[in-house]
Each structure stands twice: as structure tokens, then as C-alpha cells.
Image (cartoon, helix red, strand yellow):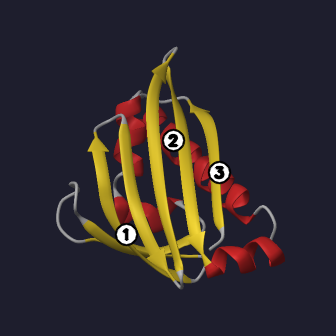
């Protein structure tokens, strides 16, 4: 079974609380994340909560594995023969927030994606971090006015 792991980071000019609020409002992901068309959590955000979402046309079923507001969230996800674990950490740093995301994937689809779209996971995480940065910084600027 093919395995793939990628880690990426970005500095966001907003507090960890502001970034956390944007990032963990799963129902609003499609409003600011260009690749996500729908997202819906079942009940409140908690360890064991499930949520469904579509990214890049793929329907994904996820479960929250770990939650430490506003520092860490981790979830698993399943879609078309692929299992993934996605972890996000937020660290206050000089009046901003260092956001690090790590994703590990395994399954037959990973083999195909590596073959036909090398770097697909790097591009996906770069896009997510960029969109999160833009949204969280805009929200933070609005609050500070």
C-alpha cells in the first residue's frame, strides 16, 4: 500500500485564537477554502465528532481524533480507497501564529495520484495554508478596527 506524508508551515498575522476560530468552523470551510465545496460537522466539535466534506470533487468522511484548543486538532479521513490523518498545530510566535500541518495518506489512490499528479499533497496543503492565512488575517484585521 502506498504511503505519503507531507508537513508544511506558514506564519499568520493573527492570534492563535483567531486562526483557531476560522480553521475549526468546519461548516464555513467552503466560504474561504477554494478547493472545498461543502463541509458539515455532525454536532459540536469534539473528539469523536464526524464531519463530511468535498474537496477537489472527492467526498471525504472524517472523524476528529484529537482536540486541544487553540493549539492542536487532528482528524482522520476516508475517501475512495484512501485513508488519511491530518494534524494541525498552532503556536503563538511574536504576535502571530505559526501554523504547521502534517498529513499522512495511504491507499491505492495515493499510488495513482503520485503517478499522474506528482506533488499533489504539497500543492493541496500549500493551498489550504494560503487560504487559511488570507481568511484569518482578514478576520483579525476586522476585529482590530
Question: How far across and how far down the image is residue 125, in percent?
Answer: 63, 54
Query: Tag 1: Cα neighbours inside 10 Å, few (<14), some, or many (≥20)?
Result: many
Upstream in sequence: badge 2 or badge 1: 1
Q: Circle 2 sits on which residue?
A: 138
Tell me the residue at 46%/49% (across/down). 87
Instruction: Give residue 38's position: percent from left, percent from top.
Output: 44, 76
Figure disc tally: 3
Q: Could you tell me which quadrant the N terminus lies in?
A: bottom right
**Would you place residue 23 above or below residue 39 in this image?**
above
Q: Quadrant of residue 64?
A: bottom left
Measuring from the top left, give residue 11's x and y in whole percent. 60, 31
* Quadrant of the rendering where the C terminus is positioned: top left
Q: Are marks 2 and 3 in contact (CB under 8 Å)?
A: no
Cβ–Cβ under 8 Å for marks 2 and 1:
no
User: For the residues marked 2 and 1, what is the alpha-carbon distance in whole angstroms?
Assistant: 27 Å
Front-most of residues 91 and 39: 91
What secondary structure is marked by label 1? strand
Residue 121, labelled with which disc?
none
Left or right? Give the position of 63 relative to 9: left
Q: Which residue is mark 1?
A: 62
Sequence-wise, the earlier of marks 2 and 3 is 3
Whether residue 116 sits left or right of residue 131 in the image: it is right
Residue beneath label 3, please? 6
Q: Tell which residue pokes out farthest to the top in this image.
A: 94
Front residue of this view, candidates 26 and 108: 108
Q: Quadrant of residue 111?
A: bottom right
Other residues around mark 3 within 10 Å, as few (<14) / some (14–19) / many (≥20)? some
Residue at 52% over, 36% down: 99
Amino acid at each position: 500500500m502506498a504511503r505519503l506524508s507531507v508537513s508544511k508551515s506558514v506564519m499568520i498575522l493573527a492570534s492563535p485564537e483567531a486562526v483557531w476560530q476560522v480553521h475549526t468552523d468546519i461548516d464555513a470551510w467552503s466560504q474561504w477554502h477554494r478547493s472545498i465545496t461543502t463541509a458539515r460537522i455532525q454536532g459540536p466539535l469534539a473528539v469523536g465528532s464526524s464531519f463530511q466534506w468535498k474537496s477537489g470533487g472527492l467526498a471525504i468522511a472524517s472523524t476528529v481524533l484529537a482536540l486541544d484548543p487553540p493549539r492542536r486538532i487532528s482528524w482522520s479521513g476516508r475517501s475512495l480507497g484512501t485513508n488519511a490523518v491530518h494534524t494541525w498545530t498552532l503556536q503563538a510566535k511574536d504576535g502571530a501564529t505559526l501554523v504547521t500541518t502534517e498529513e499522512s495518506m495511504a491507499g491505492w489512490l495515493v499510488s495513482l495520484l503520485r503517478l499522474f499528479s506528482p506533488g499533489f499533497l504539497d500543492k493541496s496543503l500549500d493551498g489550504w495554508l494560503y487560504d487559511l492565512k488570507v481568511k484569518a488575517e482578514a478576520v483579525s484585521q476586522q476585529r482590530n478596527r
